[in-house]
Structure formats: structure tokens, C-alpha cells
Image (cartoon, grey):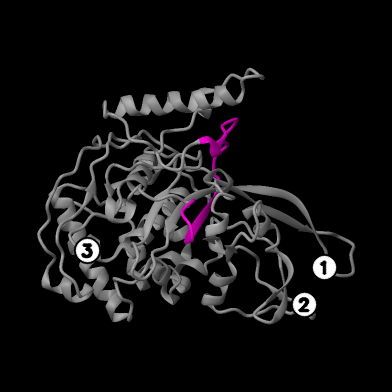
Amino acid sequence: MEFSDVRRVYDFERNGEAAANRLANYPPLWEGIQWSTGIDCLIVVIRHIYCNGMMSPDLTKDLKWFAESEALNPILGHAWHMFGKEDAEVAKATEDREKVHEVLLSLSILPSASFKDICDSSLMNETFWSQEMFRLSHPPVDATTGDAIQLSADEIAELSKLEFKPGAPGDCIQNVVDKAFGQGEWKGRQIFTVPHQPCVFRVLYRADNNLCDSVSIKQLKTLKLPVWAQVEGEECACFQEIDRVDYFLMAIVRLGAEGDRPDFVRTYSPYGQNFACAYRPRLFMANDWSISDAPQDYMLFYGYRPVDVGNIDVTDFPEVTEGREHGGTLDLIDSDMEEAKAKLQAGEAIKITTLPVNDIPPPPSEPRPSDVLDDRLERGKAPPEREPEDVDMTIAPPSASMRSSTGQDSDAMDVDDEKASV
């Protein structure tokens, strides 16, 4: 019997890299793909979160909340799907996706809803974003009385999401982070928050048409979260910053608007490279957009950087990985290695530095899995993956149950035929 769940196919202790590679490079591909780009984008983001911070061999033991959350939220379980472009893989993904839609409909959630509506839904907040590992700050207290403030799951998730709306040229996203903690007003109440160290946190970025040239992808690639410690010997609770923790831009979702284009997603490695993926469904992973497009809203996802990037300038990689002629997986890996080395050498032209082999970043298609819970996942030799290929397939319309879920008819699956530059 063949399994369709990454956790059943791979032994994370011995083949963690292969599992992370599958999650990062194989997005959803199913027969009704054009009707729910919001969920598809969310699944891509969740898979990226999984392979960057939830690759523990004993996940349900280390994260006791996850089993219950997965039982309540079908999206979380479906995000572990193997996926793939072969006929049998697409058929299995379609079968499983229809079951997900049935559960969502029973929860009064439309499978055709936008990314923002589903990502910010109470279902996602209760089962995912409100969990301790995603909290941007420790539980808040009343700034006047010092009493703990009880929050709902929706409020916890809301408090853990920042908003960046540049008001003038030169406005910096880091300033939004720096002002997010300490005393402030929230929902008409004075509160005090102390920074936490989440696995992932979100920033709603609202690009202004008049300021679209003021913020580039380079300025968004990295952020630092402060680490506070309580000062001893003070009558009142007093904190000071003692360190800063690096976070990297792991995903961008271009939020669609009513009557406009659908939602689109783009993902990045801890080294700053854009993931090209084994195939790229154009309906939600097209490359004909940029973070500089304005006016436009984007959801940015920042992840804890689990690796030391050494002297590599992670902001120096382009927003989108350019396609190149396909010379085989090994040729592509060598090419990316040489590109990374060249960027490093260019940045260190004055000071000669020897880069240890272990510090050379992997190509974006073969991420180094991380386990934030155990700090570093023991890695074994990964079995070889099939080389990326062109995809040219016509898919039959979805079943009647699928049409009833979406209210629309299917035409064909549109998959980018670019060669994966991974």
C-alpha cells in the first residue's frame, strides 16, 4: 500500500532532507486547482513552516497540541500530502482534496474563499496561529494593574500579526517590529507585552502606490526580533534588551482582490534564495508579479533562521529565481553552488575569506531541514528525487461533488513549464 502522507513515506531521523525537499518543492496539484487558490497558497506556506520548524521525528509528542489541531482542521493534515505531477499522484491528491472540502463546508468555510479569509479564520487561529510556538509576544498584562489579560484564540493570533504600511519614503519594516513591544494601546486598553521567540510570525504589508519604490525585496528579506530580560532588583517589572534573533522571509502571499487576480505565493530558503520547485502551477505560483507592485496588500511570513549563513548576504539573491536550461539535477545543484560562491566572493573582495564547505548554502530545492524544538535535526542520506520535468497535461473536469463544493466548472490544469532552477 502506497502512502500519500510525507510522515508515512519518510523516516525523519534518517531521511529528513528528502522529506523537507518534498514539502518545499512539491506544491498542491489536483484537478480542481483553479477554484481554490487561497487554500493552495496556504498549503504551500504551511508546508514551508513544516519543513523549517516541525520536522521532529516525534512531532505529536513534542507538540502535544498538533494531533488535536490536525483532527479539527483538515488543511493541516492535507499539507503533509506527497503531491506530484504524475497522473496517479494528481488523482490521489484530488481524491483527498475533495474530502478536505467536504469537511470545510461542514464547518461553514467555503473552499473557494480567499487566502486571507481562510488564513485569518477562527479555524486556523484556534488550531494553529494561537499556539505558543507562533506567539509574537508573551501573554500581555494590563499596563496599569499588571493583571494578566485573557485572550481568545482569535485575539492571540491578531496580536501576533504586525502591519507594515509605509507612510513616507525610508520607512522600514524593522521599525514596526521594534515598536511592537512594551507599553501600547490595543483595542482601547493599555497593555504591556514582552517579545517572545516564535517559530514563525506574520506581517501584513500594504504597499502604497506613491511609495512603491521605497521598499524593495532586499529590505524585506530579514528581520530581527529583540530578546528582553527582566532587570533584577527593581520594584516594578523592568526589562532590557539583551540580544536580537534573526528571522528570514520564508514566504510572500500576494493577496488577491475581488474582481482582480487570485492569490499568489512565493517561498524562500533561509539563505535568501527563491524556491523554484519541481513544478509551478501558474494559477497560484506565477512569476509575473513583484513585491514592488502597488497599491497592493501582501502577507509576509518570517521564520526563525535555524542555520548560520556565515558571510553570505541573504539579501543579494533576486526576488524570483530565473529559469535556466535543464542540464540535470546535479548540474543545477553545481550551478547554484557556484552562484552562491560568486556572491560571497564579490561581497568579500577586500577581505579574503575561505568559506568552509559546510557553510555553502544548499540550492533552494534541497533545504536543510531544521527542528526548532531540538535545535537541529539529525540528518541522514536522502534518497534521490526524480528530476524536475516539463509538465504538459490536460485534466478532466472535477467530479460532481467538487463542482458542488466550488460552484464552478473545471477546464484544465495550468502548470508552468519552466525548468526548475534548483
For residue 146, the mark is: 2
Quarter-of-image position of residue 241: bottom right
Q: Distance between the residues labelled 1 and 3?
A: 51 Å
As rendered, which of 214 and 19 lies closer to the eye? Answer: 214
As rendered, which of 183 and 60 lies closer to the eye? Answer: 183
Pointer 1 or 3: first along the chain: 3
Q: Which amino acid does label 1 sit on?
A: Ala
Range of magenta residues? 292-316
Residue depicted at x 27% and y 51%:
281
Label 3 crowd (10 A; few <14 / some 14-19 / many >=20): some
Provide the residue designation for mark 3.
96
**Where residue 18 sits in the image (x, y, percent)?**
34, 40
Question: Does the magenta run of residues contain 46?
Answer: no
**Residue furthest out toward the left:** 396
Provide the residue designation for mark 1.
237
For residue 382, the mark is: none
Label 2 crowd (10 A; few <14 / some 14-19 / many >=20): few
Q: What residue type is labelled 3?
A: Asp
Question: Does the magenta run of residues contain 315?
Answer: yes
Pointer 1 or 2: first along the chain: 2
With respect to residue 125, does 168 lie above or below? above
With respect to residue 311, does 98 lie above or below? below
Residue 47 in sight from this viewpoint = no
